[in-house]
Amino acid sequence: MTGISTKTIYAIAALHELGSIPQNEVLKIKDIATRASVPQNFLEQILLELRKQKFLSSVKGAHGGYRLAKELKDISLKDIIIVLETDALSDVCRTDNPALKLFWEDIKEGVFDVFDVPLSELKNYQQKVDHTLNYSI
């Protein structure tokens, strides 16, 4: 089991941007990349994977782009990690010791419980940022 990669961080940033638009609208990859401060080339791969996994849908054509296929409340950080992190469910215990295997299984389960937060929580964090006073001169 490893940490969260840049790929997942960029995916969450893109989903946050897509969650901020009205349901019937779409965003072009270029606009998502700009708004989320994510490299467009890398984002294209991420969005394709999220679309394949039915988190996003796409509209083709001049006025096309991406939109959420599910509401953010129905997508958890855990869901995205499982899809994008190839080592997320890897076997960290490389021993035949049953006590150690059980220990690492419990740890892995506990870690995933922490990540089982819906991405709709992003709106709460956006509200906190929006309500923070900025006293820059």
Image: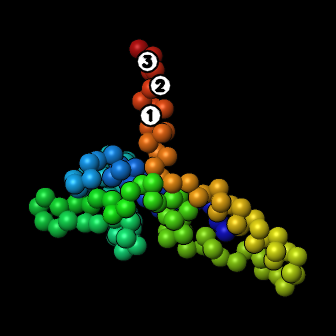
Q: Residue furthest bottom?
A: 96
Q: Which mark is residue 136?
A: 3
Quadrant where the N terminus is found in the figure: bottom right
Measured in 3D between alpha carbons, the distance from the residue under mark 3 to the one under mark 1, in whole angstroms, is: 19 Å
The residue most toward the left is 62
Which residue, given by chain and number where applicable, does mark 2 sit on?
Answer: 132
Kindly state the secondary structure of the residue where label 2 is placed. loop
Tag shown at residue 107:
none
Q: Earlier in the sequence, mark 2 or mark 1?
A: 1
Q: Position of residue 72 (x, y in %)?
A: 42, 54
Please tell me whether mark 2 or mark 3 is closer to you in this view: 2
Q: Quadrant of the C terminus?
A: top left
The answer to whether residue 38 is seen in the rendering is: no
- State the CA–CA distance, disc 2 to disc 1: 9 Å
Amino acid beneath label 2: Thr
Q: Are marks 3 and 1 in contact (CB under 8 Å)?
A: no
Name the residue rendered at 42%, 30% in the picture. 130
Name the side, left or right, on which 19 lies relative to 108. Answer: left
Q: Left or right: 109 with respect to 28?
A: right
CA gap, disc 2 to disc 3?
12 Å
| Label 3 vs 1, first from the N-terminus | 1
User: For residue 131, what is the image quadrant?
Assistant: top left
Q: Residue at the spot x=84%, y=85% of the render?
A: 96
Q: Nearer the viewer, mark 3 or mark 1?
A: 1
